[in-house]
Image (tube, grey):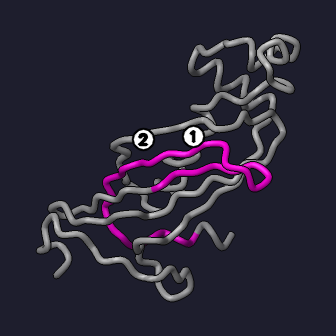
Amino acid sequence: MFLKTLNSIFIPASNFSSSSSALLKIGDVLKKSRTFTDTDVLNYSELTYDSNPVHFDSEFARNFGYNDRIVHGMFISALFPRIIAFHFPGAIYISQSLQFKLPVYIGEEIVAEVKALNLRVNKDRYISKFSTKCYKNGDLCVDGEAVALLPTLVMDVEGERS
């Protein structure tokens, strides 16, 4: 394929159009929404051994300035690799930077999005830099950037239709 011979050359930007093609382009945005439950937080805590009382004790959380118990920030940010791996099976997450802007409370709907900022060929794969953001009620609560190694630029969109 011609693109594969352009080792380490940046792929030019194009306008986003989800209906014109399933090929990832700079500017494309992929989204996933999720509402975290008590059970989700408990299961995450058990897996990670993170038993900080701000996640389980409302009074403790309020004493630290929160309205109620909060969802683990790293649990929320796990939506980003999920979005990428869903659309690009076999993708490898290389790096992630994060800033937690607002607390997320159990029961709040979060919309996570990854936006392709940069694409370049690397041997027979593609390196993509994404902006990563989570919103609750339209307010930015998590902000960052991720880099992933993609096996292809062709997005798997079959699951989106179901």
Question: From the viewer's perspective, is 73 left or right of 69?
Answer: left
Judging from the image, what secondary structure is the residue with disc 1 in? helix
Estimate the spatial distance between the alpha carbons at disc 2 and disc 1, rounded to whole Å: 9 Å
Work out whether residue 38 or residue 106 is closer to the camera in this orientation and state it: 106
On the image, numbered disc 1 is attached to which residue?
Answer: 77
Q: Position of residue 117 (x, y in %)?
A: 40, 63
Q: Position of residue 42 (x, y in %)?
A: 73, 23
Q: Dividing the image into 4 quarters, which one contains the C terminus? A: bottom right
Question: From the viewer's perspective, is 98 left or right of 123?
Answer: right
On the image, numbered disc 2 is attached to which residue?
Answer: 96
Q: Dividing the image into 4 quarters, which one contains the N terminus? A: bottom left
Q: Which residues are magenta?
A: 131-158
* Residue at (35% x, 48% y) in the render: 92
Judging from the image, what secondary structure is the residue with disc 2 in? strand
Q: Amino acid at mark 1?
A: Ser
Q: Earlier in the sequence, mark 2 or mark 1?
A: 1
Which of the 4 image quadrants contains residue 69? Answer: top right
